[in-house]
Image: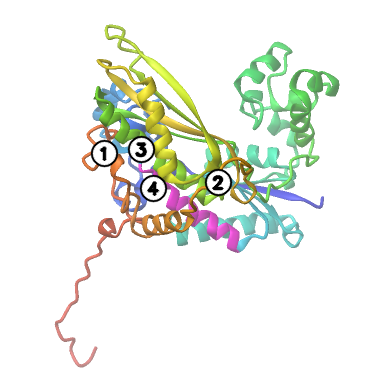
Amino acid sequence: MNTVFALVDCNNFYASCERLFKPELEGKPVVVLSNNDGCIIARSNEAKALGIPMGAPYFKNRALIEKHNVYVFSSNYALYGDLSHRVMSILQQMEPEVEVYSIDEAFIRLPETHIAGADLRSHALFLRKKIKQYVGIPVSIGIGPTKTLAKIANRIAKKDASCRGVLDLTSCDDMDTLLAEIPVGDIWGIGRRNGEKLNRQKIFTALDLKNSDDEWIREHLTVVGLRTVMELRGTPCIPIDHEPVPRKSVVCSRSFRKPVFLVKDLGEAVSSYVSVAAEKIRNESLVAANLHVFLRTNRHRKNLPQHSDSLMVSLEPPTSSTPVLIRAALQGLKKIYKKNFSYQKAGVMLTELTSSTMRQQNLFQPLPKNNGAVMEALDQINSRWGRNTVQYASSGLDKPWCMSQEHKSPAYTTRWDELPVVKAFCNTKKAPDNE
């Protein structure tokens, strides 16, 4: 065995982030809500034990939440993103090969110097301890000869307290017994639909899939499914991805706190969303060839008139300039907006993204005015002092359309005015001479 993979996964990440600056919540049930405090998108173990379902509407579970004194937080993505970056930075400092898979997960390939049985577990426990010490976020680590098996190991490490947050499958003596306990739909890369398809073929567990016919898997789950089967057999087929796949598109949209009727308010919202999307593609040195603007009413309010529409605006040449993108979005918005409708949501999407260093020029149009220095200065100011420190006037100031976040915690790590304050008390009483 020359390769060993590990999956590092932050435990109940959003809930753990909220607890970090409120240690009195340790051991208490915590839930985090989606945009506009709509649905439950994260739960602590204590909240799961109460039977609070994932993805359920908050208002339908309010009685259960209040009955058990569950602590409720609005989503605070600036805080979660910053703490995620800190966790990943520690991994990248301590490990030579790291693939950031999601906001709370990372694969690492352990160097051959650690491939020595017990050393793997002790090394993983060391990583876990350092992340907890430096950031305060608890993690679970699964180790296996393939990424798929490392995923399974991580899943077990999270659920089984006897693992102490770490499970090493490279030293497992009876892998088949373990795989027989894993539902096939829970395997990384299979999903619900393929799981149902496999169940119809009497393939119910990871062990069944491991022993399935290769030709049938290739025919019905393509070569991607066959790779998963090979990984279950211990053959690495999915390497560490050192470079993230370039974005194909960027979407920024929000539901409004209350219905919006005026095109002026819709324009402010769209301008704000464009600013966020433009900053994202600039950070990745990309430009967009198309901008899509869309809006819709509340489809659940059947008693109200309904309207939903979208429009694509071509950008010639491709750009990441915020003012150019705002101008295009507002022009598109005016074409799809209709009076006397109660709009619930609007948004923008940038597509046909390409590298800013390889953009196609137009022979029959003059080169656009280069405002790259202005955009760079804008991004640097907002990065240092917080988003919207400097913004375009078209985004508005009062923002009555802004989404509801009644339970939002402070931006403890990204805004100077919301940094946690520690009060220190000094005992000025003089100690006796004999002390």
Report if residue 49 is visible in the image: no
Q: Which residue, given by chain and number where applicable, does mark 2 sit on?
A: 366
Q: Name the foreground residue: 387 vs 356.
A: 356
Give the amino acid type for the residue marked by disc 1 in the picture.
His
Cα–Cα span, label 4 and label 1: 15 Å
Q: Which residue, given by chain and number where applicable, does mark 1 sit on?
A: 407
Q: Which image quadrant for residue 63?
A: top left
Q: Which residue, given by chain and number where applicable, does mark 4 sit on?
A: 78
Q: Name the foreground residue: 404 vs 89.
A: 404
Q: Position of residue 88 (x, y in %)?
A: 54, 54
Give the amino acid type for the residue marked by disc 3 in the picture.
Ser
Q: Earlier in the sequence, mark 4 or mark 3?
A: 4
Q: Name the foreground residue: 84 vs 433.
A: 84
Give the amino acid type for the residue marked by disc 4 in the picture.
Ala
Q: Could you say whether the residue bearing mark 2 is in a helix, strand or loop? A: loop
Mark 4 or 3: the one toward you? 3
Give the amino acid type for the residue marked by disc 2 in the picture.
Pro
Q: Which residue, given by chain and number where applicable, does mark 3 sit on?
A: 271
Q: Earlier in the sequence, mark 1 or mark 2?
A: 2
Q: Position of residue 209 (x, y in %)?
A: 75, 24
**Residue drawn at the location 74% of the way across and 13% of the way down:** 201
**Residue drawn at the location 46% of the way across and 46% of the way down:** 321
Cα–Cα span, label 3 and label 1: 26 Å
Q: Name the foreground residue: 175 vs 199.
A: 199
Which contiguous range is marked in magenta? 76-93
Report if residue 343 is visible in the image: yes
**Residue drawn at the location 23% of the way across and 43% of the way down:** 397
